[in-house]
Image (tube, rainbow, N blue to C red):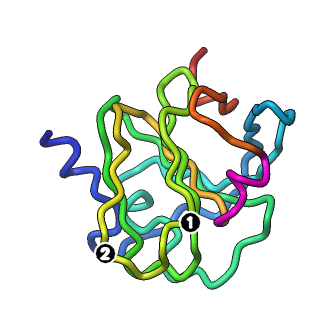
């Protein structure tokens, strides 16, 4: 439970991911969908996330990597973009999906399961690719 509290994203403004993009694929019943993602792999980048962004291309996103598999909780404070949040286990399996998170909301969004990653995409992307629990995210961080 302590890790879940520590994983609350966006508590205070901090450095954002370095801006470099990495290829990531989401495999669903409709095929393999490619995205370019920024990686938030340290506390500062995870805390800042996509805060203050006003737009993001349809094929872009942010992947939050956590060093320990545990339940995590996010919120949308200071985030202007409506987002889909995809909660991912260590092997790349999608464990839960939170669609259309409301911008600027302080409502807590729990993963509902232990995860090691969270993929944030523009709201509507999960539905557009027919993403479901059990689908796979392919990225070097996830080990099948």
Instruction: State the separation of the CA atoms marked 1 and 2.
Output: 14 Å
Out of 93 and 57, give the one closest to the viewer. Answer: 93
Circles 1 and 2 in contact, beta carbons < 8 Å = no
* Rendered residue at 76%/33% (across/down): 28
Q: Quadrant of the C terminus?
A: top right
| Residue 72 % position (x, y) | 32, 45
* Rendered residue at 14%/39% (across/down): 1
* Rendered residue at 34%/29% (across/down): 69
* Rendered residue at 54%/46% (across/down): 86
- Residue 141 magenta-highlighted: no
Q: Callout 2 environment at 10 Å: few (<14), some (14 to 19), or many (20+)?
A: some
Out of 125 and 39, give the one closest to the viewer. Answer: 125
The secondary structure type at the circle numbered 2 is: loop
Relative placement, left or right, of 11 versus 55 is: left
Any mark on residue 74, and which? none
Relative placement, left or right, of 92 versus 4 is: right
| Residue 89 % position (x, y) | 48, 28
Query: Where does the magenta region start and end?
Result: 123-129
Disc 1 designates what residue?
Answer: 100
Any mark on residue 106, and which? 2
């Amino acid at each position: 439970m302590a890790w879940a509290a520590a994983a609350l994203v966006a508590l205070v403004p901090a450095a954002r991911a370095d801006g470099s993009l990495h290829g990531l694929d989401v495999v669903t019943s409709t095929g393999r969908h490619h995205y370019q993602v920024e990686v938030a792999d340290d506390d500062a980048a995870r805390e800042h996330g996509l805060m203050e962004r006003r737009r993001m291309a349809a094929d872009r996103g942010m992947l939050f990597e956590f060093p320990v598999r545990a339940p995590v909780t996010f919120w949308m404070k200071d985030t202007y973009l409506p987002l889909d949040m995809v909660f991912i286990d260590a092997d790349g399996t999608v464990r839960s999906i939170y669609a259309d998170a409301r911008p600027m909301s302080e409502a807590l969004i729990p993963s509902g399961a232990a995860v090691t990653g969270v993929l944030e995409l523009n709201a509507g992307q999960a539905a557009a690719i027919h993403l479901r629990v059990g689908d796979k995210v392919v990225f070097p961080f996830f080990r099948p």
